[in-house]
Amino acid sequence: GLFSLAAFYTTVNHIKDLPMHGGREVAFVGRSNAGKSSAINTLANHVRLAYTSKTPGRTQHLNYFSLGNDGYIVDLPGYGYAKVPPEAKRHWEALLSTYLQKREELSGLIVIMDIRRPLLELDETMLDWFATTGKPVHILLTKSDKLSRQQSTLTLMKVKAYLAENYPQCSVQLFSSLKKQGLEEAEAVIAGWLKA
Ligand code: GDP
């Protein structure tokens, strides 16, 4: 699959250090604990390719993974930590908003949301920042195994309806790292963006 050659590439802490790799990239973003590193690791079939530090202030970097000739995956810093010093918050906002709005190599954005708490305030902030680019967004409603099939389908429908109204460039699917649900669908979206 697309992710079979995934390997750590580089870590970036400042916009000026973004790599000039000449390829395309797809970024993953989400609230801390939503399941972002699990989703990346599941897609890559690696136990610990993506590693999220749970310490606020140590989470302000962008981690790049190479997919061989197919492009790059960028693991963006998580958000929503309870206690983040104001200075760290400003750095994070500047880094994320600039990256999302200005990075030409970025083909599309994967937003990870816990299916039990989708579309919280900072999730929408990400969608708003990125919407200015007109590039596509795909949401993974993770931990879908935590809800019944009926409940997860209902949530998916509600989120779809909300996106159609407010963020028409956004698509959404169910995902579970635990049950390996939704891998093919997510991989197809990412492969399409990297090839487009
Ligand atoms: P991150 O902070 O967004 O990178 O979140 P992690 O990937 O570290 O996951 C946070 C917690 O949620 C961990 O305890 C994971 O084991 C758990 N988790 C992640 N994905 C799933 C999933 O699909 N199903 C279930 N049941 N738990 C998950």
Image: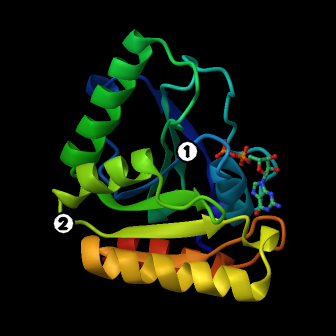
Where residue 109 sits in the image (x, y, percent)? 39, 60
Q: Residue at x 41, y 48 (%)?
A: 121
Where residue 143 sits in the image (x, y, percent)? 73, 64
Asked if residue 11 shows in the view, the reply is yes
Label 2 and label 1: CA atoms lie apart by 22 Å
- Where residue 52 sits, quadrant-wise, is top right
Task: State the residue position of label 1.
Answer: 31
Callout 1: helix, strand or loop? loop
Image position of 170 with respect to 150: above or below: above
Amino acid of disc 2: Gly
Asked if residue 168 shows in the view, the reply is no
Circle 1 packing at 10 Å, graded few (<14), some (14-19), many (20+), is some
Instruction: Check the picture and name the quadrant holding the N terminus.
Output: bottom right
Q: Residue at x 48, y 58 (%)?
A: 111
- Where residue 58 sits, quadrant-wise, is top right
Q: Is residue 78 left or right of residue 46?
A: left
Which is nearer the N-term, disc 2 or disc 1?
1
Instruction: Check the picture and name the quadrant holding the C terminus.
Output: bottom left
Q: Residue at x 66, y 20 (%)?
A: 55
| Circles 2, 1 touching at the beta carbon (< 8 Å) | no
Q: Residue at x 73, y 89 (%)?
A: 150
Task: State the residue position of label 2.
Answer: 134
Q: Relative to the observer, which residue lies in front, 17 or 36?
A: 36
Amino acid of disc 1: Arg
Callout 2: helix, strand or loop? loop
Image position of 13 with respect to 128: above or below: above
Where residue 180 sits in the image (x, y, percent)? 78, 73
